[in-house]
Amino acid sequence: MSAVLKKVDPAWRAFERATRVGPIRNKAHYDEMVGMLDALIAEVNGKRSHPLAGLLYIVGEFIRAYDERHFPAEDVSAVEMLSYLMESHKLRQSDLAEIGAQSVVSAVLAGKRKLNARQIARLSKRFGLPADVFLDR
């Protein structure tokens, strides 16, 4: 074992016993990790310089990997995503000025018109989502 690993090994074992942070093994462990993630988000509060910011990232990555393996995302069209967001945020076509006039929104939702780059960028910013969720694959 290298000198670095000899130093890290006891610290890692103690950390793992105390936190159970590691690849998620089952639903109960997943729930534990989500609880830890929630606590970390509240503690770190968006501050990248916070001492626990790295741990927040690591826990989030373990959860993301588990989610991708156990709950693969379905490909949805831009129209399906937009319709879902409108429903979940209780929005009407006239509420989406990011796209344009109500008639433009209607044409997009009917599949008669595609979203352009400017509209996608604005929707991405409004909903805090990556732009690619508004692209058809």
Image (tube, rainbow, N blue to C red):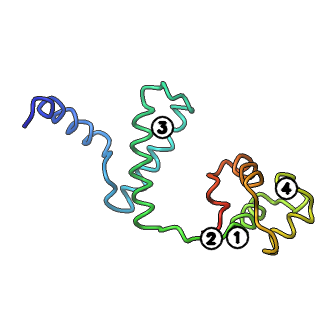
Residue carrying label 1: 80
Q: Is residue 106 left or right of residue 50?
A: right
Residue carrying label 2: 76
If you read the primary sequence from the N terminus, does the residue marked by circle 3 or circle 4 appear first? 3
Contact (CB < 8 A) between labels 2 and 1? Answer: yes
Q: CA distance from mark 4 to mark 2?
A: 20 Å
Nearer the observer, 103 or 44: 103
Q: Is residue 8 left or right of residue 3?
A: right
Residue carrying label 4: 96
Q: CA distance from mark 1 to mark 3?
A: 32 Å
Q: For the residues carrying marks 3 and 2, which lies nearer the camera in this image? A: 2
If you read the primary sequence from the N terminus, does the residue marked by circle 4 or circle 1 appear first? 1
**SS at mark 3?**
helix
Q: CA distance from mark 4 to mark 1?
A: 15 Å
Furthest residue in direction left, as rendered: 1
Dot 4 amino acid type:
Leu
Residue 4 occupies which quadrant of the picture?
Answer: top left
